[in-house]
Amino acid sequence: MNLKYLTYRLISLIVLLMLFPMSSISTKANSATIWLLTDIHHFSPSLFDEGSKLQEMQNQSAGVDLRYSSQRLASLLQQIEQESPSVLLVAGDLTLNGEYQSMTEISLFFQAVEALGTDVYVIPGNHDISNAFASSYIGDQIIRTQQVLANDFEQLFADFGYDEAISRDKDSLSYVINLNDDWRLFMVDSNIYSKGVAMYAPQTNGNLSNSTLKWLRKQLIDLETSHQKALVVIHHNSLIHFSALHQQFTLDNADDLQELLAEFNVPLTLSGHLHAQHITTEQITESANLTDIVTGAFAVYPNPFAEITVDKQQFQYDFRTLDMDSWLADQDNLNKDLVAYHQYMLDLFSATSNQVALDNIIVGHAYSETQKQNTLDMFREVNLATFTGNMQAEYTGIIERYGELIEELAEYQNDFFISNVLEMLDMHTENHRQLDIIW
């Protein structure tokens, strides 16, 4: 299906839904069903064609699919219509590289979601604001396009958090939403971006300013009066998940946030940015633990999102994936990628894994072709199990197939990438797809 035609159909559906909205689903009761997306990385189909520059960019995208975001959003809209979650939360990186056109289309998509009765609340990610890489890829050319600035983001998403907030931070795009009688949403902007048009790449790392921390403290103090619990959503991770990947992923001043949350008995944060499905817990003080749940990137195989159920005393988190098959079944004139969409997405992920292995594990070793292929296969399976949060289920099979190879690699555990592989394998003892917390 032509991408521009698909965009036209999606916008037409949005208009119809706005003209004939369903009754809004109340979140003021004592329970709510929340869907959480992160790292959507939408890229407007008006900004690319099938030229050489798009393919070059796709090859460098670390498994993020650039071509079919519009189809994923259309499929998600259908799934939301069928299941009617109370709330959709988006934890940043809405766009590929902060293109204004991409962001405008995401805003229209959220209008359609709210017309179905689902409330939408968003925060930016490190890709979204003042990004000098905002570009179109036409033929063999890279053409710079309009960037989203901080005030643009606030205006485009005024109806999706900013105009509904009971409190806003004056120094960031952070805000608080009164979800219901028992819960408040803390949508925390952890990104570092310039105030104007950027000339350089945005910073990948995140930080909370002293001013934002003071604002956050005041909001947590207010909970003592309202007797509500805090659900904290932030793009950057509040804890270290992988020792090899914490720089630029874990908040620069994570200690400050951890101590603040421990002081007010907030046991949980929800984050993104890492693109991997992963849950970790650390003891912060003698009496307080903190858990950070990273939901995998929606733009990467297997297109995950989280379903969260909250009531007066309980938080329940479950890993889910986009039901693309149901939407595709109703579409005509699908190209070869969409006909085999899941394999297409898996192939993108596998290509990235293979390149990492070739560049960092196999290089410098006198492997035979059989040993080389065995190492590629092993790393691809370990990487896939880790990034999909499924190591607990896949570990036994991986050890059965590659145990001898893994023992050989363990001799090189001082090597950065091999130690990373061994660390990923050690994650098999924990469930990274589901968690229940009783407050």
Image: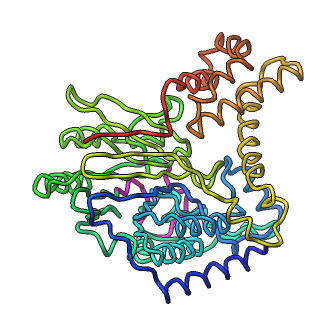
Q: Nearer the viewer, residue 363 or 18?
A: 18
- Count of marks placed on residues: 0
Confirm whether the magenta stretch covers residue 360: no
Image quadrant occupied by the C terminus: top left
Query: Where 400 sits versus 91, above or below?
Result: above
Image quadrant occupied by the N terminus: bottom right
User: Magenta span: helix, strand or loop, mainly?
Assistant: loop
Query: In the rendered image, which quarter is residue 96 located in?
Result: bottom right
Outermost residue toward the right? 369
Q: Is residue 13 left or right of residue 86?
A: right
Q: Locate residue 59, reporting x and y percent.
A: 75, 50
Query: Where 268 sits versus 177, above or below?
Result: above
Query: In the rendered image, which quarter is residue 413 located in?
Result: top right
The residue positioned 77% from the left and 46% from the top of the image is 347
Confirm whether the magenta stretch covers residue 203: yes
Span colored in magenta? 188-204
Q: Is residue 250 left or right of residue 2?
A: left
Q: Is residue 169 left or right of residue 8?
A: left
Outermost residue toward the bottom? 19
Q: Locate residue 217, reporting x and y percent.
A: 19, 51
Q: Locate residue 256, reporting x and y percent.
A: 27, 41
Q: Nearer the viewer, residue 424 or 236?
A: 424
Query: Where 420 sits versus 11, above or below?
Result: above
